[in-house]
Amino acid sequence: AQSVTQLDSQVPVFEEAPVELRCNYSSSVSVYLFWYVQYPNQGLQLLLKYLSGSTLVKGINGFEAEFNKSQTSFHLRKPSVHISDTAEYFCAVMGGGFQKLVFGTGTRLLVSP
Amino acid sequence: NAGVTQTPKFQVLKTGQSMTLQCAQDMNHEYMSWYRQDPGMGLRLIHYSVGAGITDQGEVPNGYNVSRSTTEDFPLRLLSAAPSQTSVYFCASSRVRGTDTQYFGPGTRLTVL
């Protein structure tokens, strides 16, 4: 079964600084990778997804992620964060054959002035 | 377009009580699913449905029942609530099963005393 690891439970950062949220997945022949964001007291919203093709995926709100097959990673990055980016971010993986979506434990991004 | 709606937003139950969490979507999506979110555990799949009349178990189905009589609605029933079912419950839908974007409802926060 697929699994995903988000090593950082919380990442504090100052406004306008760059940020990277780490995600590693269990290896498989083919995987599909996702990043979701959850703002306080809301449901999850898709930020971006990797299905195939270019390994650099651009999403909403200036976020991007890079699929690295050799390192089984899919780290999320933003060059300059805003206060409004404060939220919990979930990495998720789906195995080939459209298996179920498996979520990581989440990383809370705390942006301070 | 309301998207995915869930009722109630909050609920407190006593051990042994039963209740139904409601979920509806107005996007004509075939695939619907229920997740529970617990601190430090991310989201875990409870049950899912690939279309009206078809349901299947997810990762943590014990203590929960579902049915899908229409495309729009996917209620989750707690048969005999237990404190271990205290959680935040999210309903999600996507056009079809697979890598299509899943749209999440705002969640139901359930406390079982």
Image (cartoon, grey):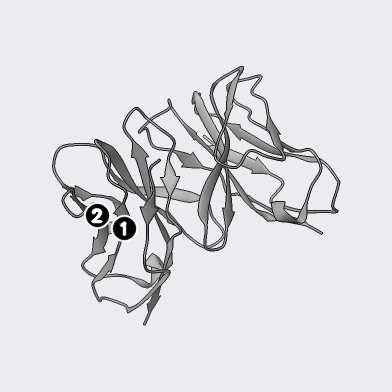
Q: Position of residue B110 (x, y in %)?
A: 71, 53
Give me the chain letter of mark 2: A
- As shown in the figure, which amino acid type bears the numbered disc 2? Ser
From the viewer's perspective, is residue A44 above or below residue B18? below
- C-alpha separation, residue under disc 1 versus residue under disc 2: 6 Å
Q: Nearer the viewer, residue A71 or B72?
A: A71
Sequence-wise, the earlier of marks 1 and 2 is 1
Q: Position of residue B71 (x, y in %)?
A: 58, 21
- As shown in the figure, which amino acid type bears the numbered disc 1? Cys
Residue A63 visible somewhere in the drawing: no
Tell me which residue sits at (55%, 29%) in the image.
B26
From the viewer's perspective, is residue B100 above or below residue A7? above
Numbered badge on residue B72: none
Quadrant of the snapshot with the C terminus of chain B: bottom right
Q: Quadrant of residue B72?
A: top right
Residue under label 2, please give it: A73
Q: Quadrant of residue B109?
A: bottom right
Q: Is residue A85 left or right of residue B19?
A: left
Tell me which residue sits at (24%, 36%) in the image.
A29
Tell me which residue sits at (37%, 61%) in the image.
A6
Other-residue count near label 2 (Cα within 10 Å), few / some / many at <14 / 14–19 / ≥20: many
Give me the chain letter of mark 1: A
Numbered badge on residue A23: 1
Q: Is residue B95 left or right of residue A18?
A: right
Q: Nearer the viewer, residue B91 or B82?
A: B82
